[in-house]
Amino acid sequence: METVRFANGVRMPQLGFGVWQVPDDEAERAVATALAAGYRSIDTAEAYQNEAGVGRALRASGLPREEVFVTTKLPNWRHHEAATALKERLARLGLDYVDLYLIHWPVPRQDRYLQAWKELERLHADGLARAIGVSNFAVEHLRRLLDEADVVPVINQIELHPYFQQAELRAFHAEHGILTEAWSPLGQGPRSGLLDDPVLARIAAKHGKTPAQVVLRWHLQLGNVVIPKSVTPARIRENIDVFDFALDEADLAEIAALDRGTRIGPDPRTFG
């Protein structure tokens, strides 16, 4: 498994396993399958209501704690109590610390994300989170945070896939030492039609891979952290089988041309 390095020196697997919209009991089975398949990074959140199942799978795996990178997130309605929220998350997960704690959405209408970030900085200093970052922050949210922060977010987890490539935001991340992490990296499957795109089908046939594997490989070659989700064992194993081929420059150019600039999920400037 390839890793990325945060500005604070902590390393994270570049490809991980997401459990958004997976019920708690199903999350336990899915995470167990993912860990057995070789995943070593699990992404959950309080809002997903499946941290207990994730924790059960982590304990049942028998893997040493330091071998699994665990991410969870502060929900929108708890920006004023980030410390309490994280301690509850640790209890649900059955862990002493998380590897990465994120503010899930900026919720600008609420205007508490700066307050939340200051609390995350304290939690990081206390060792309850090895690294801290944000999710769904636009450039204007990041600029305001950077003006006030003592610790720069190590990562911003955003909607990102070939139909919504976020070049401006990725460039801002690179300029400020913030890594980019993609949620819904496969465009939420049938909802967007991404995996039925003929360009991806042609590239997949060329490499003897599936369109999903081509998209995940594209993310990796861009330098994105990526967290595909599935509850199907065969698909879970397929999604990690992307380290034995590489896209060439022509492939990358064709995928770059697929950008439509349209979201599947909500706009962080107005959501929450």
Image (cartoon, rainbow, N blue to C red):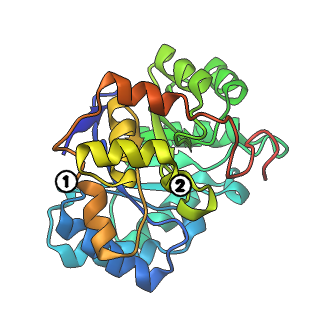
Q: Is residue 179 visible?
A: no
What residue do we see at 44% from left, 20% from top? 177
* Whether residue 141 is situated above or below residue 50 in the rendered picture: above
* Above or below 268: residue 256: above
Residue 227 in the figure: left or right of residue 264 = left
Where is residue 214, by image quadrant?
A: top left
Which kind of residue does numbered mark 1 sit on? Glu
**Point 28% across, 42% down: residue:** 206
- In the picture shown, does residue 158 fall above or below 37? above
For the point 29% across and 33% down, which residue is it?
Answer: 247
**10 Å neighbourhood of mark 1: few (<14), some, or many (≥20)?**
few
Callout 2: helix, strand or loop? strand
Circle 1 SS class: helix
Expressed as whole percent of the image width and height from the top left, the position of residue 116 reads 64, 43
From the viewer's perspective, is 182 left or right of 130? right
Comes first in the chain, label 1 or label 2: 1
- Residue 216 point in image, percent of width and height: 37, 46
In front of the other: 239 or 103 = 239
Camera-side residue of 95 and 162: 162
Of 232 and 207, which appears nearest the observer? 207
Is the residue marked by circle 2 packed among few (<14), some (14-19), or many (20+) residues within 10 Å? Answer: many
x and y percent of residue 220 in the render?
33, 37
Q: Which residue is mark 2?
A: 73
Amino acid type, residue under disc 2 in the picture: Lys
Direction from residue 10 to residue 87 in the image, left or right = right
Q: Is residue 258 visible?
A: yes
Residue labelled with disc 1: 66
